[in-house]
Amino acid sequence: MSVLDLGIDLGTANIIITVGKSGAILNEPTVIAFDKNTESVIAFGQEAYKMIGRAPEHIAVIKPLRDGVISNNDMAQELIRLCILKVIGKRLINPRIVMCVPSGITAVERKAVVESAVSAGARTVYLIEEPVAALLGAGEDIMKPFGRMVVDIGGGTSDIAVTSLGGIVAANSVKKAGNAFNASIQRYFEEEHRLLIGERMAEEAKISCANMFWPSEEKTGVISGRSLVSGLPARMEISEADICAAITDDVDDIIAAIRTVFEMTPPELVGDIYDHGMVLTGGGALLRGLDMYITREFGVKCFVANDPLGCVARGTHMAFRVRDRLRNGFEKASVSRL
């Protein structure tokens, strides 16, 4: 059988697969729909995402990852298998797979990730920590004796790390990221305006109205849901200030995690970071004003990487070329087949 190298960013919100120099060739929401009557998968990715909040009782719309780790092993394995088949078709291929994991993941969680790749037919499985992959994908040279710092804000976790000489020097991870932002937006409108909105509506409000650095009180968007007062459909105009108020506590938890990493970092590397700045990656990097908010908090320049959403996925595949020089944050996992 022929061999193919795949880089897989198995994120809480999206699964992205890269192959060779072609870059990302699959980017789908990490969602799968299961028909409980027929006990079969009926949709995955974007098709399943459209069913969130709209499916009848016999269809379970499942997000198999929570806070960056697998929470439903069977559905995660099936989702990965379907996505790989979508990429490679019916060719007889045993791929080598690099999969990224959050820093600080437990041994049990690592095993679940490896098993999901093996079930999809992987010949060899490597694990790379998200901050390392994010820096590689952002084009940073982490092999030099120079401090590089990344803040990777995904769907389930925010991972912060400092690297030098191909290894992680200091790292921290906090379960405050895109999904937590959405939940906080839902809670804010429920508590402050007695309006119940869905997860997708919160996501849309975050994308269209978030501004962390200079939020305006001018009404720039509209959300709809169910009034908790009348029980009837309702809608209201919202502003950047509303979204900022909803997610500031979550963002400040990320700020605290960054501060912890600075406190663990040797002073020489802190000086390098001061000169070079922090790299912001992941879907959370797309929040308007977040880079300037972080810069204001620390007095250190924070800049958004090119295509921040695809950095981790690109880095997973790039790791094949530099795997012999990566000192930690990267490992070859044992693959066992019955």
Image (cartoon, helix red, strand yellow):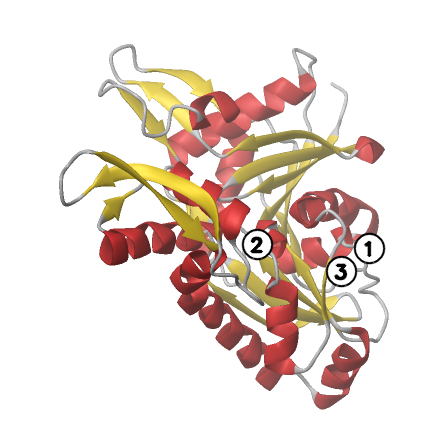
Q: Closer to the camera, 245 or 198?
A: 245
Mark 1 touches mark 2? (CB < 8 Å): no
Judged from this view, the residue extending furthest toward the bottom is: 267
Q: Closer to the camera, 214 or 95?
A: 214
Q: Secondary structure at mark 2?
A: helix
Q: Considering only vertical position in the picture, is 235 above or below 57? A: below
The picture places residue 213, in percent across and down from the top left corner, at 58, 67
Counting other residues with Cα less than 10 Å from the Cα at mark 3, is it few (<14), some (14-19), or many (20 or more)? some
Q: Is residue 312 left or right of residue 40?
A: right
Residue at the image position 14 percent from the left and 45 percent from the top: 229
Identify the amino acid type marked 1. Answer: Gly
Q: Closer to the camera, 201 or 271?
A: 201
Residue 12: which disc?
none
Residue at the image position 66 percent from the left and 33 percent from the top: 17
Judged from this view, the residue extending furthest toward the left is: 230
Residue 326: which disc?
3
The picture places residue 74, in percent across and down from the top left corner, at 39, 31
Residue at the image position 53 percent from the left and 63 percent from the top: 215
Identify the amino acid type marked 3. Answer: Leu
In the picture of the structure, the residue carrying the numbered disc 2 is 284
Which of discs 2 and 3 lies nearer the camera? The answer is 2
Q: Considering only vertical position in the picture, is 238 above or below 328? A: above
Which of the marked residues, 1 or 2, is nearer the chain's N terminus?
1
Which of the marked residues, 2 or 3, is nearer the chain's N terminus?
2
Residue 139: which disc?
1
Q: CA distance from mark 2 to mark 3?
A: 26 Å
Counting other residues with Cα less than 10 Å from the Cα at mark 1, is it few (<14), some (14-19), or many (20 or more)? some
Quarter of the image for the N terminus: give it: top right
The picture places residue 257, in percent across and down from the top left corner, at 51, 73
Which of discs 1 and 3 lies nearer the camera? The answer is 1
